[in-house]
Amino acid sequence: MTAMTALPTTAAAPAAQAASLVQSVDWLAITPVVLPAAVALVVLVADLFVPERRKPLLGWLSVAGLAAATATLIPLRAGDRATFCLAADPGACSYTADHFALVIQFLVLAGALVTALLSVTAVRDARMPAGEYWFLLLSSAAGAALLPASRDLATLIVALEVASLPAFALVGMRRGDRLSSEAALKFFLSSVTATAVSLMGVSFVYAATGSLHLTQVADRLEDVPGQLDTLAMAGVALTLVGFAFKTAAVPFHFWVPDTYVGAPLPIAGYLSVIGKAVGFTGLILVTVIAFPAYSAVWGPALAVLAALTMTLGNAAAVRQRADRRNSAVRLLAWSSVGQAGYLLVPIAAAAYSGRDQIGSTVAYALMYGAVNLGAFAVAALVARTHPQNRISDYRGLYAQRPAAALALAFFLVCLAGLPPGLIGLFAKVTVFRSAVDAGLGWLAVVMAVNVVIALYYYLRWTALLFRAPEAPADGVRTKAPWPVSAAIAVTAVVAVVLSLAPQLVLRFASGSLFPL
């Protein structure tokens, strides 16, 4: 009788175990990722049936989709959702919508929305294939939105590639343009190499820990057997390479100037903000969440990378000649490399004083995203009448387009960290303080020197806007397309509001964005 009563219990065990593996999906939590991906598929299919004269509708559909995806972050603002969790360990989830993920998703989706506004006119004027362009942009935005919520190494790598692969094609979208094709090829080859190195690192980490979930990896790296310590250390170092490439950190920066010059200007702005946000997000997740046990390895390495990146980026930006073709875009490209150095400082500081320092990188990234996209928006406007994109083309811009000149001047002042661009000043002070609090006094000194160097090229460009033009403008001034004007206005308003109320982003610098 005992054996017979035990039989149903034993037979029911596999069924109960199988039932426990069935998970309910939190659709609200993943909506910011699913919505742009769904709109991308709709655009791709609609492109087959929409006549050529109605192709601009695909652009406005994409703009609406990105706006809706950004709005879906509002009901998630509590930051207490997670899904795709392990049945055996509910604390190990593949997707977590915490405050860190939501802030970065807002930066990514809002930045993609501004890029879409700039692209509406660019796609039409450059005669780029509308369906492919919008599908690729939306797909890349979906991957970039997925990455900050990813909490296992496999999802991180997949999100990184979904964000990156469409970007390769977007860079080379201008058919028949040799610079565009070369830029796309250089971007592709270097990025694929970095990804391959990262995948090898992930495989080493998995071999040493037996898990891909970040929290489990962190726990198991605390007690790695001695024979696996070298393997784990190599895995940590190699995993960081791919994300360091996306941040344009030295020595992984060489693709930046040529890629920005060859890409359509909206895509150059997209890479400078969203592409950089993707890299820094991945770097933050793998360092402070997955690899805190090896902070003695990645902390000093990132500190040195930060110093080299800001120094080389600013030194190269100073050397840009105003009369050189594409010098305006090259200056913004090298400026973005220098800014990447500042963004690396709090991540390096987190190795010495805890993950709370990460908030300084997030606050700085929000400021940088708004003003840098605004600068590229003004560059896209000026390029309509001066396609060579030289810095000298901006001489006397205030006399021709006062609003655009004032907006660009404010963006440059914010990047320099000078009043009235108070948000740039406070963001730099916050990053500087994180280095001091972590005991990285030498890095704080390097940053202070680089901030002074950057003042030269930012202020030189700003002063040029208000100088008298070399020759009076001939002909009738063309009217700025309203989507471009809207993009400039939105970024300018955000920059002004943040300067008047810097606590809106600086509050992220105090306290942890991750659940305890």
Image (spheres, rainbow, N blue to C red):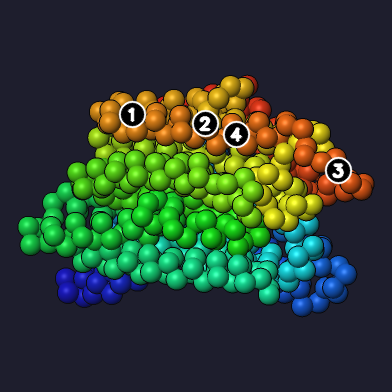
Q: Residues within 10 Å of mark 1 (few under 14, many from 20)?
A: some
Dot 2 corresponds to which residue?
Answer: 455
Mark 1 and mark 2: Cα distance apart in space: 16 Å
Camera-side mark, 4 or 1: 4
Q: In the rendered image of this protein, does residue 207 appear above or below residue 250?
A: below
Q: Which residue position is annotated with label 1?
A: 445
State the CA–CA distance, disc 4 to disc 1. 24 Å
Q: Earlier in the sequence, mark 2 or mark 3?
A: 2
The residue carrying pointer 4 sits among few (fewer than 14), some (14 to 19) or many (20 or more) residues within 10 Å by Cα, namely some
User: Closer to the camera, 151 or 382?
Assistant: 382
Q: Amino acid at mark 2?
A: Leu
In the shown orientation, is residue 73 left or right of residue 127?
left
**Residue drawn at the location 34% of the way across and 33% of the way down:** 446
| Picture disc at residue 460 | 4
Outermost residue to the right: 476
Report, in whole angstroms, how far the alpha carbon at label 2 lies from the one at label 3.
30 Å
Q: From the image, state whether disc 1 or disc 2 is nearer to you.
A: 2
